[in-house]
Structure formats: structure tokens, C-alpha cells
Image (cartoon, grey):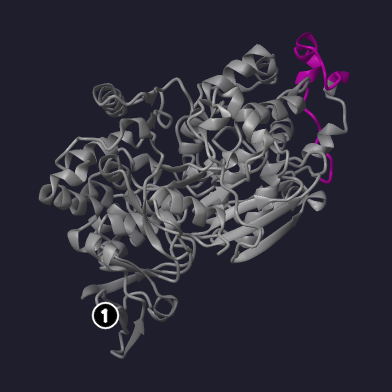
């Protein structure tokens, strides 16, 4: 299980909001984390840093192919993103940097800012627990094994590195 | 079973007999593009524990963003790429002088029908202009693919967009796409392959096809595709690609589409994407008169030769309004050379434009950024908050014709209005450079009550 306190956003949160282009000179998640959601101001940034899960509406991560949008969120301590839907490249980048991205529109709608959100990747459930204490679970189709293996390894690079170390001929 | 373009192409790239939408396949891209992100790929490769590349001939690097370098850090990143390309036998390396990766690679004949391309840039959908499948990926994916040669890919569903023409005068591919993005919204084609067809598409120039396929990304598309035809073949021939150098792919006539979207070309008018999302689209009439501080003609969407020519046809004999800056960033060195050779660059310069080196320029926030409270009309493909400087600035998007008309007015303007009137000072639209320099052309044009603000 992964999860914790959530911070909630609306629809069409784009990559320029998540990670402004001027900071792409870095690939260090800790350094990038300083600038996550900077265009939305320091209060939003503080709320993100105090959260473990980002909840959002439709088309989260739309815009550029910048991988730092995903790795910066991870650097800021985010362990999962639950959204009504994801932009294609963000979804890829999330998986490939080891950040679970779960499409679950009902869970995204049910969760309120500050709620506790838990994700069980193996079972395929998102559980939302409100401040009042009542919990709701929402199923999602479990990921294909090939993607789970990448997530388990912590991302595509550690996954491929592991393969190369195990079978050097794979690199050819 | 009948198959779409994307299903046929990914089956070929994965070396399997068939691939259906929804499946995940391991696909081998024919070309792996990385731009300014190349140094990130190289640094990431170091974590893989090998630098044996699957096939250096499948790798292309283009130094297009942040070029030429304006910080020592960027200069160091570019130096790393240069040295890596030389030491690893990467022949398709294009340095800071070349221009925007997408346009440069197509001009160089590296993009061919039926190819699968991945790139560290979301607008890699542009390669569909030549009947190829291009898509954006992250830098870690590029580094992994350099070594393994393949990447996991979900076979997308397909959407067919049929655009029938002709378009009215003053209306272009950019307007088609802005209209479409406004109607389908920014996630209207998420994860989908967008196939274009219709009488407007057939026979369309490669330049306009690039604009269509580039902007398909702003619908969330994975691929975009224009069926190859004699225009495609002629372009490739002019780029030194022989007819037997590629294998075209066409969808089956009875292929299954998630959705079919007709676009009525003759009914279209110039469109504007308003701040701060690309799907916030309105007809130009509704925003005409909005004061702008800067006009930017650039980006992989609309800074090709045809785009500069389109802008010059309006700017010829006219001058940029006082208090407005016009920045022109040609998409590539070749575009710049051609525009210099036939006088288009002279027209732009004499109208008051600032011309920068080829590349991504202000679209990626490099030079030509805005202050708090400033407004830009840009020919680029994205208007997100903070993309061009201040978070408190506004970006409007339109065609090169809208951009040129807006530069002349100093306010968002309908290019069809200027087409109908003689330039100030009585100069004809075909005014010679000497006339363009006349003092009359520098007078401030009065805005009409309908459009003035």
C-alpha cells in the first residue's frame, strides 16, 4: 500500500504548471522538488510537500514531454497520482520514473483536499478516507505485469540496468 | 481483420503479424530523436552501466532549445552532447546552428513514410506529415531505447478527422487545428492516433501538414498521420530520398475508428487560442482589438518557409505598430537561407521585425520572454501560464497571418481586413523595398471602432 494525505487539483493541470521550463536544466529530483507547482504560489507548494498523493481531474500532466514533471513530484515526496485521466506522455513518464499514476475518475471525484488516499497496486484499489473517518474503495484494472515490473524496480532505468547486469547480451 | 495506420505501423515496428488497439507491444523505433534533453539522456545512460548503443544510425540529436547557450551550464551540456555524438559514431548530430529538431530532421530526409520515431519532445506527432508515426517520450525512455533498441508502447485507438476544403482566403491549417482543439478539447484525442483525410488534406503542402500533425499533440494525441501521396513523394525526392527508400502504410478502408470528426473547411474563419489553455478557442472577431506588446512568429508549428512568406505578404509595405515588438525565429537554417535568398527576410526586417537565430526561441522561453502584465500573440502551439516569461503574462495563439496583422495593428487583428486594404502610404501589397522604407509606412494606423480598444 502506498498513500497518505492528498492534495487536490482540478482539470488540465499542465506540465508548465507542474515544472516550469526554466528549471529543466536539472535532473535531480530533490532540486526539482523546490520548483514543483511554483506558478501556483508558495501556499500550494507547501500543501504539495505536506502530501503523499496528488488527486486531480481530467488530463493531468498535459503539455510537454518533460520527464521532470513526474520526477519533480516524486522528489517532493508524492508517492502516487490519482486522476480522472492522464495526458499520455505524463503517464509514461510517471511509470518510467517509478511514480504510480492511477486513472480512477470516481476516486478522484470523491477525494477532498486533505483526505487520506491509499493505493493498492496489486489488488487494484484506491481507498479514500475522509476527515470524518468514513472510507470508500474504488477498483481499477491492475496494471499489466510488464509495467508493474518497471514500477517495482523504481522506474525504467533501474529496471533496464538490472536486466543488463543479469544478462549483458540483452544490451545488444 | 481491417487495421488502422497505427495498428499496422506498430505491428511492423514490433515485428509481429498483427497488433490491435489496447495491446502493449515492444516496438523498435526507426529513429530516436533527442533535442536539448540529449545531455539528460547521456547522464541517464551512465546509470545503466553500459554505453553500448543498439544502433547509432537510429539516433539523431539536435541542439534546438537554449541555443546558442546563454549560461555556462547549458554550454557544458551541449559540449557533452557534441563529444558523445563524436565518440559514439552518431552521424545525425545537428548543432546549435541547425534549427528546430522536427523541421531539421524532415528537411534532411531522415523522416520517411512508415517509420516509427520517438523523441524527447511532445510535438513529435509532426512526423505524421510524411506518413510516419512520431510520439513524445521522456529522456529516460530515450536512454533505455538507445541501449535496448525497443520501448513498450500501447497500440492506440484511432480517430479520423476529415477536413473538406477549400478554406476561405486568410484561413490556414493552424485555424483548422485551433477550431478542432476548441471543439474536442485538450484531451479529445488522448492516447489516440489521429488520421487526417478529406479534400483539403489531399494535395496540401508538407508545410501545412506539419502544422496539422504538430498541433494534434494539443488534442492529447499519440500519433498523427496524413496518408502519403504525390506531395509526400515529391518532397522526399527533393530531400534525396529515393522512392524505394521507404514503405508507405495506409489504413484499411474498413478500419475501426473510435470516432470520426468532419470539419467543414469552407465555413472556417481565423481562430485564436486564448490564455491559458490551447482549447480556449474563439473566432478572431471576438478577441480583435486586444492590445499586444509582443508578436512571436516562431516554433515547430508555424515558422517554416511558407509561414514566413504568409506573414511577409501582409507585412510587405507596412510597419509594426509603435509599442509592439515583432520577433521572428525561423524554424531552421534552411528556412532562414531561403527567406534571405528571395527577399522575404528583407520584408520582415524592414517592417520592424527582430529576427533571431533559428531554433525554438521564445516558444520555449528563450529570449523574447514577457514582463508582468504583457500580452503576446504567438504562432506557437502552447499558451500555458509562465511558458514565455512572467507567470502574470498572457499568450494568445494564432496563424502567421493573424500574427502579421496583429503586429501591424498593435492589437489582435483579423488578417482578412488587412488583405482588403492597401498598406499605409498607398503602397501596393507588392511594394518594393524602397517603398517600404518610406516615412508614410511608419505612421500609426487607426483602429476601427469595431476592433479598436
Question: How far across and how far down the image is residue B445, in percent?
Answer: 80, 29
Question: How far across and how far down the image is residue B354, in percent?
Answer: 58, 22
Q: What residue did someone put label 1 on?
A: A123
Q: Up-down: is B50 above or below A18?
A: above
Which residue is at the front of the view, B285 or A25?
A25
Q: Is residue B273 left or right of residue A99?
A: right
Tell me which segment is drawn in magenta.
Answer: B425-450
Q: Is residue B129 left or right of residue A108?
A: right
Query: Does residue B325 appear in this view?
Result: no
The picture quadrant where one finds residue A37 is bottom left
User: Is label 1 in a helix, a strand or a loop?
Assistant: loop
Q: Residue furthest top?
A: B434
Q: Quadrant of the N terminus of chain A?
A: bottom left
x 63%, y 32%: residue: B233
- Neighbor class of circle 1 (other Cα within 10 Å; few <14, some 14-19, many 20+) is few
Q: Is residue B413 magenta?
A: no
x 32%, y 70%: residue: A143
Which residue is at the front of the view, B214 or A34?
B214
Q: Is residue B436 magenta?
A: yes
Which residue is at the front of the view, A3 or A124?
A124
Q: Up-down: is A85 above or below B420?
A: below
Q: Residue furthest left?
A: A166
Query: Does residue B305 appear in this view?
Result: yes
Q: Is residue B402 left or right of residue A52?
A: right
Question: How far across and how far down the image is residue B415, in percent?
Answer: 78, 37
Amino acid at each position: 500500500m502506498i498513500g497518505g494525505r492528498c492534495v487536490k487539483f482540478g482539470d488540465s493541470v499542465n506540465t508548465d504548471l507542474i515544472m516550469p521550463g526554466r528549471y529543466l536544466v536539472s535532473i535531480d529530483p530533490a532540486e526539482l522538488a523546490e520548483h514543483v507547482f511554483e506558478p501556483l504560489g508558495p501556499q500550494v507548494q507547501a500543501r504539495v510537500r505536506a502530501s503523499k498523493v496528488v488527486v486531480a481531474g481530467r488530463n493531468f500532466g498535459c503539455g510537454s514531454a518533460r520527464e521532470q514533471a513526474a520526477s519533480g513530484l516524486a522528489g517532493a515526496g508524492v508517492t502516487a497520482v490519482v486522476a480522472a485521466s492522464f495526458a499520455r506522455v505524463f503517464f509514461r513518464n510517471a511509470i518510467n520514473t517509478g511514480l504510480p499514476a492511477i486513472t480512477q475518475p470516481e476516486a478522484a471525484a470523491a477525494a477532498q483536499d486533505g483526505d487520506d488516499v491509499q493505493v493498492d497496486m496489486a489488488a487494484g484499489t484506491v481507498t479514500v478516507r475522509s476527515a470524518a473517518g468514513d472510507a470508500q474503495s474504488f477498483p481499477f484494472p491492475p496494471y499489466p505485469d510488464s509495467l508493474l515490473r518497471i514500477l517495482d524496480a523504481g522506474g525504467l532505468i533501474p529496471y533496464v540496468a538490472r536486466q543488463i547486469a543479469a544478462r549483458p547480451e540483452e544490451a545488444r | 481483420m481491417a487495421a488502422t495506420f497505427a495498428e499496422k505501423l506498430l505491428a511492423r515496428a514490433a515485428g509481429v503479424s498483427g497488433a490491435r488497439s489496447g495491446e502493449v507491444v515492444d516496438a523498435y523505433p526507426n529513429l530516436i530523436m533527442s533535442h536539448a534533453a540529449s545531455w539528460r539522456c547521456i547522464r541517464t545512460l551512465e546509470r545503466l552501466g553500459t554505453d553500448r548503443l543498439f544502433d547509432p544510425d537510429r539516433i539523431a540529436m539536435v541542439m534546438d532549445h537554449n541555443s546558442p547557450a546563454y549560461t555556462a551550464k547549458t554550454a557544458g551540456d551541449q559540449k557533452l552532447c557534441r563529444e558523445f555524438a563524436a565518440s559514439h559514431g552518431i552521424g545525425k548530430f545537428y548543432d546549435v546552428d541547425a534549427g528546430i529538431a522536427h523541421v531539421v530532421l524532415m528537411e534532411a530526409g531522415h523522416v520517411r513514410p512508415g517509420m516509427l520515431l520517438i523523441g524527447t519532445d511532445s510535438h513529435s506527432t509532426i512526423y505524421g506529415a510524411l506518413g510516419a508515426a512520431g510520439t513524445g517520450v521522456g529522456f529516460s525512455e530515450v536512454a533505455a531505447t538507445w541501449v535496448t533498441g525497443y520501448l513498450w508502447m500501447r497500440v492506440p485507438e484511432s480517430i479520423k478527422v476529415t477536413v473538406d476544403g477549400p478554406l476561405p482566403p486568410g484561413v490556414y491549417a493552424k485555424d483548422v487545428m485551433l477550431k478542432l482543439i476548441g471543439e474536442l478539447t485538450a484531451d479529445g484525442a488522448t492516447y489516440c492516433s489521429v488520421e487526417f483525410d478529406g479534400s483539403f488534406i489531399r494535395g496540401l503542402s508538407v508545410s501545412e501538414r506539419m502544422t496539422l500533425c504538430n498541433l494534434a499533440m494539443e488534442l492529447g494525441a499519440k500519433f498523427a498521420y496524413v496518408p502519403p501521396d504525390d506531395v509526400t513523394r515529391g518532397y522526399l525526392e527533393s530531400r534525396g530520398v529515393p522512392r524505394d527508400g521507404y514503405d508507405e502504410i495506409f489504413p484499411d478502408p474498413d478500419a475501426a475508428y473510435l470516432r470520426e470528426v468532419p470539419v467543414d473547411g469552407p465555413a472556417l474563419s481565423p481562430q485564436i487560442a486564448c490564455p491559458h489553455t490551447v482549447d480556449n478557442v474563439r473566432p478572431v472577431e471576438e478577441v480583435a482589438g486586444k492590445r499586444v506588446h509582443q508578436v512571436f512568429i516562431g516554433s515547430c508549428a508555424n515558422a517554416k518557409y511558407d509561414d514566413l512568406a504568409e506573414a511577409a505578404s501582409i507585412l510587405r509595405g507596412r510597419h509594426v505598430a509603435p509599442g509592439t515588438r515583432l520577433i521572428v525565429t525561423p524554424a531552421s537554417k534552411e528556412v532562414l537561407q531561403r527567406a534571405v535568398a528571395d527577399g522575404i527576410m528583407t520584408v520582415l526586417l524592414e517592417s520592424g521585425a527582430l529576427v533571431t537565430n533559428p531554433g525554438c526561441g521564445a516558444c520555449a522561453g528563450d529570449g523574447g520572454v514577457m514582463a508582468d502584465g504583457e500580452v503576446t500573440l504567438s504562432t506557437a502551439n502552447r499558451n500555458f501560464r509562465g511558458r514565455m516569461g512572467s507567470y502574470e503574462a498572457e499568450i494568445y495563439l494564432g496563424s502567421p497571418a493573424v500574427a502579421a496583422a496583429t503586429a501591424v495593428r498593435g492589437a489582435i487583428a483579423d488578417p482578412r481586413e488587412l488583405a482588403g486594404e492597401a498598406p499605409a502610404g498607398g503602397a501596393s501589397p507588392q511594394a518594393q523595398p524602397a517603398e517600404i522604407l518610406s516615412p508614410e509606412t511608419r505612421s500609426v494606423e487607426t483602429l476601427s471602432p469595431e476592433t479598436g480598444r
